[in-house]
Image: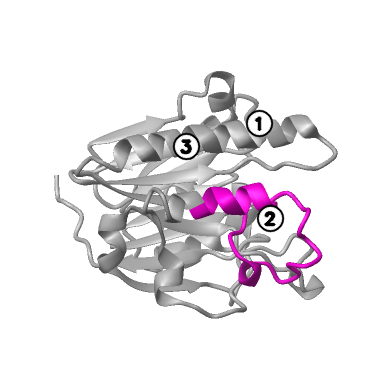
Amino acid sequence: MRVISFCADGIREAAAKGFYDWAVDQDADIICVQDLRAPESGLGAAKYNPDGYFSYFFDAIDGTTNGVAIYCRKLPKAIMTGLGLGDADGEGRFMQADFENISVACLLGPVASMEDTGSLARKSRFYEQLRTQLDKVRKKRRQYVLCGNWNMAHAARDVQQAAVHADTPGFLAAERQYLDGLYGELGYVDAFRVVNQDEDEFSWWPGGRAAGDGWRVDLQIVSAGLRGTIEYGALYKVQEFSSHAPLIMDYDIELERL
């Protein structure tokens, strides 16, 4: 099973830069796209719905921010949207495709700033709700792949200027500890790091790649039972479709035919 995760910075702009042409050529089973910045009603064109895939969109209420999409080669048993966060689910940040014994989720973590304490609180609530959900499901037989722009990095090697960003949201001590908890206490796995330990692997450059300020915030986090299935991982950097590089992961899993 090949899964691609990509944060688009606006799906129309990414499509114009050739994202879909590239993605279709990758022979992916599932493609997860975040930060659509477009309403579902405006994504009916063929270029946003590639042949051979079932397309699912979850947009924000305002239709101009956030939004996630999942493209599946095989028909899922169910699609779930939101995390039960009330008004926050109107921001279009989470969608999950359920297959027989595995679920693949697409998420877009909230952005926060030190100047806006409310944004820090909203981000914390989102991730605490996600942790509650992940703790609840980890005891079940179902396995999970959570793809997305988490808007936070785990370790110093995941931030090109780690010393500079010690007090920057996305690399705060509390956020790093949150990921410690997912990987330690809950047993989830950073799939990319199972197969790639390089120090210079970044997926996001907020000021452009030439600025030399890379972050690895685009992750596929999987349940413990999938660790042994991880075969390959790479960040595609040859073409630039947005400020984020697509993350490609291969798993030794065969999705069910329905």
The reply to whether the magenta stretch includes residue 12 is no
Q: What element carries label 2?
A: loop
Q: Is mark 1 on a helix, strand or loop?
A: helix
Which residue is painted at 39% across and 69% down in the image? 26
Instruction: Left or right? Give the position of 235 relative to 214.
Output: left
User: 71 above or below 205?
Assistant: above
Q: Where is residue 177 in the image (x, y as percent from the top left)?
A: 58, 51
Q: Which amino acid does label 2 sit on?
A: Phe
Instruction: Left or right? Give the position of 183 relative to 156.
Output: left
Image quadrant where residue 231 sits:
bottom left
Measured Cα–Cα span from mark 1 to mark 2: 16 Å
Label 3 sits on residue: 130
Image quadrant where residue 70 sits:
top left
Q: Is the magenta stretch mostly helix, strand or loop?
A: loop
**Which residues fall within the magenta stretch?**
151-180
Q: Position of residue 242 (x, y in %)?
A: 65, 60
Q: Is mark 3 on a helix, strand or loop?
A: helix
